Image: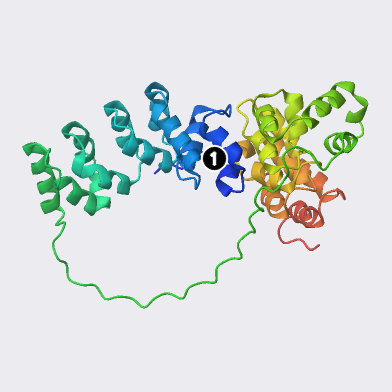
Amino acid sequence: MAEARPTNPLVEQFRRGGVARDLRLMAAQGLLPLKPDDLVEMWTDLVMDPDEGVRTAADQSLSSFPATELQPILKSRDTPASVLSWAVTHRTEHELREIALQNTSLPDETIEALAPVLTQALAELVVINQQRLLRRTSLLVALESNTGLNNDQKRRLRELRESFRIGQAAAPEPVPPPAPVPPEPEPEPEPAAEVAPVGDVFMTEDEAIVRYLSEDERQQTTKISAVQKIYRQNTAEKLITALKGSREERAILIRDPNRLVSKAVLGSPRLTEPEIEAIAGMKSVSDEILRTIGSHREWTKRYGVIKNLVCNPRTPIGIALSMVPRLNPRDIKGISVDRNVPDPVRKQAVKFVKGPGKKS
């Protein structure tokens, strides 16, 4: 099964909970300017929201989402299993189910639940996939209960059962003693739920300028004006600005104390790789933003992102240490003498410079 694509940071932040109802409802209604695949993933989460109004809005958004736009999402092996399962279960269009059933990322248990009622044409897509049927023999049993199968399909299922002796009792094997269970590693603490106020009601305009802008940036009138505009926005307006605003606005909002807003910047469809690289080097963003960047397999393919994360003293130590070996020798040598990076990171760089077998 293919590895699912990285989840949009804003979608992930909604998934963690603590988001106000009006913002969840706005998302459920499709009012956030996200990419189609991110919208669909968010909706499949929101159809299970505890609020009935949010659930209903998300269900309506998913049910009315154009089939032509949904097809490429269902075809992609990177699409999360939850999206594929919802679509094949709740969207009855033949072409959508056909595409989803051919996607190897669709969970076997989802197909098994549908197998007894699939049309003959759709059941054929399951019958021909012997790998699935052998991997999950209960799926074969579910298919055999489908009264719409033709004689040829029934014959092939019967032959598969007989060839691999599915359902035949086998001699019991001795049960080995249970292996000792290793102690579980300490889980990394989850960030607290969203508690930031709507808007910056606890911050004056002057305090916002100091928080958002560096000393050099405070000399630029355009940046001052951007902060003044953002200061007057509530959380919902900031979300929209973070997703569809200018590069300058994103550079300001990535420093917002409200996690939902800063994560929206990372989830913006307009965000570019050079911006990610610049954010990775910012010392005024939260460590959670840097952790999100450092955990994103696509963004960390860019060398500048790795280097900036390692050099940034705000990067979580575990993330920075894991990336030191990926730097080139020249940069590792520079970090080994850089007193601005955290001591554990600098010491690891020193080890690489000295090489194995050499004493400190």
Left or right: where 47 falls relative to 156:
right
Query: Which three-letter amino acid code belongs to the residue tagged 1?
Result: Thr
Based on the displayed image, in which of its 4 quarters is residue 68 positioned?
A: top left
Q: Where is residue 239 in the image (x, y as percent from the top left)?
A: 66, 32
Left or right: where 167 falls relative to 256:
left
Looking at the image, which is closer to me, 60 or 360? Answer: 60
Q: Name the residue under label 1.
A: 7
What residue is shown at x 69% (from left), y 24% (from top)? 245
Based on the displayed image, in which of its 4 quarters is residue 119 positioned?
A: top left
Left or right: where 296 falls relative to 159:
right
Image quadrant occupied by the N terminus: top left
Label 1 packing within 10 angstroms: few (<14), some (14-19), many (20+): some
Instruction: Label 1, secondary structure: give it.
Output: loop
Q: Tell me if I can see residue 235 in this picture.
A: yes
What residue is shown at x 88% (from left), y 29% (from top)? 217
What residue is shown at x 48% (from left), y 37% (from top)? 43
Q: State the colouring used for the structure image.
A: rainbow
Residue 58 sits above or below residue 244 on the image:
below
